Amino acid sequence: MNALRESVADDVWLLRRRAAPTAVMLEEIARIAADAPFRRLRTPGGGTMSVAMTNCGPLGWHSDARGYRYVDVDPGSGRRWPPMPERWRELAASAAAEAGFPGFEPDACLVNRYAVGTQMGAHRDYDERDLRQPIVSVSIGLPAQFLWHGATRGGSLVRVELLDGDVLVWGGRARAGYHAVKRIAAPDLIASAAADAPPTDETGEPLRYNLTFRRAK
Ligand code: MD3
Ligand code: FE
């Protein structure tokens, strides 16, 4: 069992292509974004994130001048976040179970959209109430270099290339670890000939999406 489960670090598991094919998920992302559009959030420090975000599920992650938090309505519209597709919830729960975290019931799914040149700096996810719950991440579209630092921001670095359909699960000792996504590179002609064409924005620019499933409350 679990021939496709790779250990990246203690309590960090990579399930290669576990979410492939991702075409249907792209349709679901488009449906979510039609209701709760992608937006670049402000940080408490006064910056603006390069990654655009939206959410689905009962709770959504939000950031503005007041800080980071989970909210049950989209501050952009005043309406509840769109529902989490049942298939997504099942995928997240079964991936968590395969990585050794049974009983995962996500109540939030943050959808990140990366254009070429965007990145996510080193950070920890600790806005969730119960840090014994894992996080499940699904990568879609352009490849990304994911950096795992562990307990400290400058800690021992593990680099993982995340490809379309890859699922990563963190929990236990890894749950509060620092991690980052390196600046997304323009598609490599040779590598992209071997992969499915990446999703694109309205102007034809290639994209990466990442879904992170969390138990926030
Ligand atoms: C590791 N997203 O949204 S996967 C994020 O690819 C985020 O968009 C990245 O980091 C992305 O916060 C990386 C998700 C992830 C989420 C939580 C973690 C990795 C984690 C918590 C602890 C360790
Ligand atoms: Fe994160």
Image (cartoon, rainbow, N blue to C red):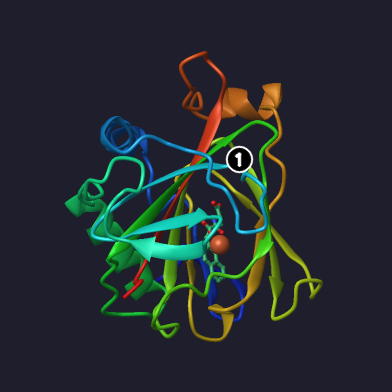
187, above or below 59, in the image:
above
Q: Describe residue 150's horizontal placement relative to residue 162 as left or right.
A: right
Residue type, label 1: Pro
Residue on which the image places disc 1: 143
Mark 1 residue crowding within 10 angstroms, few (<14) / some (14–19) / many (20+) = many
> Total number of numbered labels?
1
Residue 93 visible in the shown view: yes
- Position of residue 209 relative to residue 95, above or below, is above
Q: Quadrant of residue 62?
A: bottom left
Quarter of the displayed picture in which ligand 2 can be seen: bottom right
Task: For residue 146, say whether it is visible.
Answer: no
Q: Is 71 or 183 nearer to us in this picture?
A: 71
**Is residue 155 rendered to the left or right of residue 88?**
right
Along the line of sight, the residue nearer the viewer: 107 or 137: 107
Q: Secondary structure at mark 1?
A: loop
Left/right placement of residue 180 relative to residue 128 reads: right
* Vertical arrangement, residue 183 with respect to residue 191, above or below: below
Q: Residue at x 76, y 72 (%)?
A: 153
Q: Residue 143 location, x and y as percent?
A: 60, 40
Q: Position of residue 42 (x, y in %)?
A: 57, 48
Which residue in the rendered view is the most extreme toward the front?
66
Residue 86 in percent (x, y) is at 18, 53
